[in-house]
Image (cartoon, helix red, strand yellow):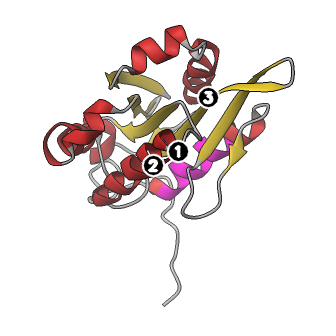
């Protein structure tokens, strides 16, 4: 995938450079770049859940990234120096749910930062262009900005990074939507 925007809030850029988080931040970008996604470029045509699964597969294939259980931060990695945990990054991937769940992700990250469990929070969301080709309630970078800068302004004070992603290119077939039990 591609990265179209990176937004830094609450001293996140300084945390990355001063706390030695640059290698973890680069790993997140590499994971995004390694995840190959082609979409049928028609409105609401593709499954956000399949995009999420592919991102999760790439995270799980990388060394020492730990997947959280339901209701926890999606992905966490601890950077160690001489067997001592030095810094921790938490990543929320929001490509397959309703846009209003972004606020839950922000709250999760804020709470973990306040408790000292993580030093930096990262949220991955679709770009405006990519969001059009996913289900209509899928969030986008625009939603993330609105929640942080207008509706939950407290989030601007925590070290938080928003990364907007975009698919690699067009496909002649949509990513198949998951069937739900009825």
List the residue tagged with mark 3: 31
Say which element carries label 1: loop
Give the Cα distance between marks 1 and 2: 6 Å
* 128 is higher (above) or lower (below) than 96: above
Q: In this view, does 96 lie to the left or right of 71?
A: left
Q: Nearer the viewer, mark 2 or mark 3?
A: 2
Q: Quadrant of residue 161?
A: top left
Q: Which mark is residue 83?
A: none
Q: Nearer the viewer, mark 1 or mark 2?
A: 1
The question of residue 104 being in magenta is answered with no
Q: In this view, does 121 lie to the left or right of 11?
A: right
Residue 18 in percent (x, y) is at 52, 9
List the residue tagged with mark 2: 111
Q: CB under 8 Å between callouts 3 and 1?
A: no
Q: CB under 8 Å between callouts 1 and 2?
A: yes
The residue depicted at 52 percent of the width and 48 percent of the height is 51
The question of residue 51 being in magenta is answered with yes
Residue 55 in percent (x, y) is at 59, 42
The residue depicted at 64 percent of the width and 40 percent of the height is 76
The outermost residue toward the bottom is 182
* 96 is higher (above) or lower (below) than 129: below
Give the Cα distance between marks 3 and 1: 27 Å
Residue 50 in percent (x, y) is at 54, 54
Label whose residue precedes the other's in the sequence (3 or 1): 3
């Amino acid at each position: 995938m591609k990265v179209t925007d990176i937004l830094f809030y609450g001293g996140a850029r300084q945390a990355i450079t001063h706390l030695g988080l640059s290698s973890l931040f680069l790993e997140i970008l590499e994971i995004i770049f390694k995840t190959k996604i082609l979409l049928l470029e028609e409105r609401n045509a593709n499954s956000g859940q399949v995009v999420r699964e592919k991102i999760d597969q790439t995270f799980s294939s990388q060394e020492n990234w730990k997947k959280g259980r339901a209701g926890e931060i999606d992905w966490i990695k601890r950077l160690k120096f001489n067997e001592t945990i030095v810094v921790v990054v938490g990543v929320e991937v929001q490509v397959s749910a309703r846009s209003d769940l972004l606020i839950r992700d922000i709250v999760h990250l804020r709470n973990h930062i306040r408790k000292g469990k993580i030093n930096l929070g990262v949220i991955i969301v679709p770009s405006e262009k990519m969001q059009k080709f996913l289900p209509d309630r899928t969030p986008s970078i625009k939603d993330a900005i609105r929640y942080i800068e207008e509706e939950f302004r407290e989030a601007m004070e925590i070290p938080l990074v928003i990364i907007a992603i975009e698919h690699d290119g067009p496909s002649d077939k949509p990513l198949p939507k998951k069937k739900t039990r009825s």
